[in-house]
Amino acid sequence: MVKALAAVLEGPKDLQFREFSLPEVGEDDAILRVEACGLCGTDYEQWLGAFNDFADGMPIIPGHEIMGFIESIGPSASKRWNVVEGDRVAIEPIIPCGHCEDCVKGAYTRCQSDLGYGLYQGTKRAPSLWGGYASHVYLHPRTMVHKLPADIPTDLMTLVNPLSNAIRWIYEVGQAGLGKTVVIEGPGQRGLLAVVAARKAGAAKIIVTGTKADAGRLQLAITLGATAIINVEEENPVERVSELTLGAGADVVLDVSSGAVAPILQGIDMLKRGGRLVLAGLKGSNKLNDFPVDKVALREIQLIGVLSAGWESTEMAIAMIRDEGSKLQPLCSHTFSLDRVTDAVRTLGREMSDGREAVHITLVP
């Protein structure tokens, strides 16, 4: 029987390789041969143990930015997804149930079933292959499957998931558009891709904040289309945004910073009346004290939490990579083989370095 090889997160900072039997494919499901899996800040936080109380916890096969080739597929699944064996596809991290209140409303990023890839089902739930740190992934009948161009380089193609997130958070949820001012707090992978999304949406001012350690990423933000950058350790970001907007403030603030809660309070002060603060950066156990409830209410500030992307934003991301991929290639900083998965995660978390700025990391079997 053919076996799949996977890196299993048995506990915090403990990735172990295990083999799993490939399940028999039925009428309505499929097996994906993994071409690559992208990594983001969530992967590092998961490796540290941040999500052990979420969904199934550990042991789990991480990896939610998954792409690959259809290896085997049932006839009903082939018809539903419009794919055949050999097709190159990307899959969305969330598997919608289709029945809960949110799914019925079309908001499947809030699906109440908590099914999905990389962060949800552990290895104890059959058939175990629910994450991209593996040679193969099981495709549940309700998986959201997107066909991919065949001629895009692997590392560039793995930007589909984070770019789709940025599009949804900036454009669909943040409602950035022509002439708007956007502030992006945190120049990580998704923050930098949010620059690209804001530029595509027609934002007039795109301001990115970061720390001294983010110097290389902040310069990359300028290359990608940011109109200004702010080192929050050297300048007051609220005062600087006020200066850059001539006192008008921002229309949209996207917080994609990890762990820090100060950007939330700063983001509220950066916004104009009625502005939107989109919260995407996870803070772990860090609590937000002294929250300015009256300021938010009196100025009608909108606070919106976001988790993932959706169908339309994913299709938009694929089109942008196909048409403007050369502009995004500088984001693709590192590629690691699966047998070096721990090095990949540690590089992402800046625990180790080869002298290059780690932005988008691709893991290949």
Image (spheres, rainbow, N blue to C red):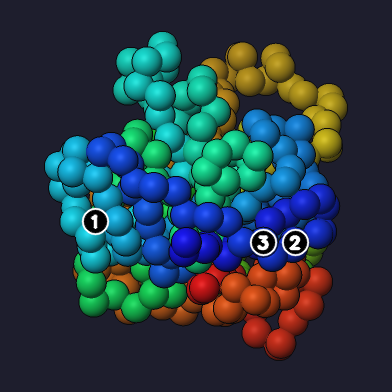
* Crowdedness near tag 2: few (<14), some (14–19) or many (≥20) residues, C-alpha within 10 Å: many
The answer to whether residue 210 of the structure is visible from this angle is no
Q: Nearer the viewer, mark 2 or mark 3?
A: 3
Label 3 secondary element: strand
Gap in angstroms between the C-alphas marked 2 and 3: 10 Å
Residue at numbered disc 1: 147
Please determine whether, in this image, residue 364 is positioned above or below residue 228.
below
Residue at numbered disc 3: 18
Q: Are marks 2 and 3 in contact (CB under 8 Å)?
A: no
Give whichever of 144, 332 is nearer the camera. 144
Q: Nearer the viewer, mark 2 or mark 1?
A: 2
**Number of marks present in the image shown:** 3
- Label 2 sits on what residue type? Leu
Gap in angstroms between the C-alphas marked 1 and 3: 29 Å
- Label 3 sits on what residue type? Arg
The spot of residue 313 in percent (x, y) is 32, 45
- Label 1 sits on what residue type? Lys
Residue at numbered disc 2: 15
Give whichever of 234, 42 is nearer the camera. 42
Based on the displayed image, in which of its 4 quarters is residue 277 positioned? top right
* Crowdedness near tag 3: few (<14), some (14–19) or many (≥20) residues, C-alpha within 10 Å: few
Label 2 secondary element: strand
Q: Is residue 168 left or right of residue 10?
A: left
Q: Are marks 2 and 1 in contact (CB under 8 Å)?
A: no
Q: Nearer the viewer, mark 1 or mark 3?
A: 3
* Crowdedness near tag 1: few (<14), some (14–19) or many (≥20) residues, C-alpha within 10 Å: some
The spot of residue 120 in percent (x, y) is 59, 38
